Amino acid sequence: MICSSSLVMSSSPSPPASSEASDELTQPQVRKFKTSPQLNRWSRARSIRSGRKLDRSVELRTNSGSPVRGEEEFELPTSPKRGSGSGSESETEGNGGGKSIFMVSDGTGWTAEHAVNAALGQFDYCLVDRVCPVNTHLFSGIDDVEQLMEIIKQAAKEGAMVVYTLADPSMSESARQACKHWGVASTDVLGPITEAIGGHLGVSPSGLPRWAPGREKALSEEYFRRIEAIEFTIKQDDGALPRNLHLADIILTGVSRSGKTPLSIYLAQKGYKVANVPIVMNVDLPKTLFEVNPEKVFALTINPVVLQSIRRARAKTLSFNGEIKTNYCDMDYVKQDLEFAGKIFAQNPVWPVIEVTAKAIEETAVIVLRLYHDRKNRCSMPRISKRY
């Protein structure tokens, strides 16, 4: 579950007694923040599910005694006590469905999200069986310290971990101090590597988010190249406009439901113009497929049992009936389809044959791009006929 949101503040303390009114007037006022109704509903719903209510507040200050980021003070919850009678596991884990990881970014959050997902890949042995379930929440476009403090406040309430990519050093430092003060586990993904590169280059980083208005060429040539690639790939999906195959950087071919379209879109997002051509038994392939540079063509194959299950799900989604459904999903037909494709692959040995069974799209894309760049740069390669 991914939620881009800020969070509701705790309720205000009760008014002081009249005898203490004069003393209270001399105390600094705790700053309150406004949040949107939608974000308030999100936070209330999570609080109701967790059965918790943390409404005590204190001021967050730096070690020197001054408030974080200037003369501002923030109302934050008291740190949840783990292991105590009043702080059950469900209370410290948000909605009770697992531990939470908050990903905070001043941009799109792509870097933080992918870093967390890559790290979670090391725990799939327990995530798959829900032995250690995790809920991730993405907060993108956080460019204001008030929003940042609201998120850290909620992380303290839920016992969540905070992973952040904040280009502004002062924002990053505020996040670090707030998390340290409230005992919130945190990781700065961007800061250490930025400092290391800055030291290596001997220059200081700009401290501006990637999409900040002050950055030059926010919409670079690479950006427009990726957009053009995506538009091209969508138009060329499923064998459309075969006359344009020579314009493609990469051409994918294989039987129906072998993963050509999602792989095409994934590669297009990286800036490659991709066309995909389906292989259908007893249907002639477009002549242009054999006229283009064969080094641009990549063949996909898949296990027949897996392919049959995918086709059954597809047929059910499209409400196939009668003979169409029988032919499309029948194991004999599936095997014949793959054999027909295999003969075409054998007749074109320059096409690498990539086995996609049990491979994620990203894994297949890595193989395609490695072979693509090896060919483009004329690097030594293993036998082309090998299945990858």
Image: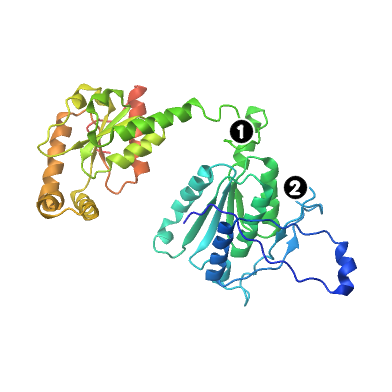
Q: Is residue 207 left or right of residue 138?
A: right
- 259 or 130, which lies in front? 259
Where 265 falls versus 59 (above or below)?
above
Task: Name which of mark 1 and mark 2 comes first in the sequence.
Answer: 2
Q: Which residue is mark 2?
A: 69
Residue type, mark 1 in image: Pro
Q: Secondary structure at mark 2?
A: loop
At 56% from the left edge and 47% from the top edge, which residue is drawn?
140
Left or right of residue 209, residue 241 in this image: left
The location of residue 15, given as percent across then percent down, is 79, 71
Q: Is residue 153 toward the left or the right of residue 316 in the image?
A: right
Q: Is 163 situated left or right of 146 in this image? A: left
Colouring method of the image? rainbow
The image shows residue 201 at horizontal and vertical percentages of 63, 28
Q: Nearer the viewer, mark 1 or mark 2?
A: 1
Residue 221 badge:
none
Q: Which residue is mark 1?
A: 213
Q: Secondary structure at mark 1?
A: loop
Q: Judge the density around disc 1: few (<14), some (14-19), many (≥20) Cα neighbours within 10 Å.
A: few
- Tell me if residue 67 comes above or below residue 269 in the rendering: below
Label 1 and label 2: CA atoms lie apart by: 22 Å
Can the viewer see residue 296?
yes
Front-lying residue, 137 or 228: 228
Position above or below: 113 against 75: above
Amino acid marked by disc 2: Arg
Tell me which corner region of the image, top left, top right, bottom left or bottom right, holds residue 162: bottom right
The residue located at (23%, 28%) in the rendering is 242
Residue 92 picture location, percent across and down: 58, 67
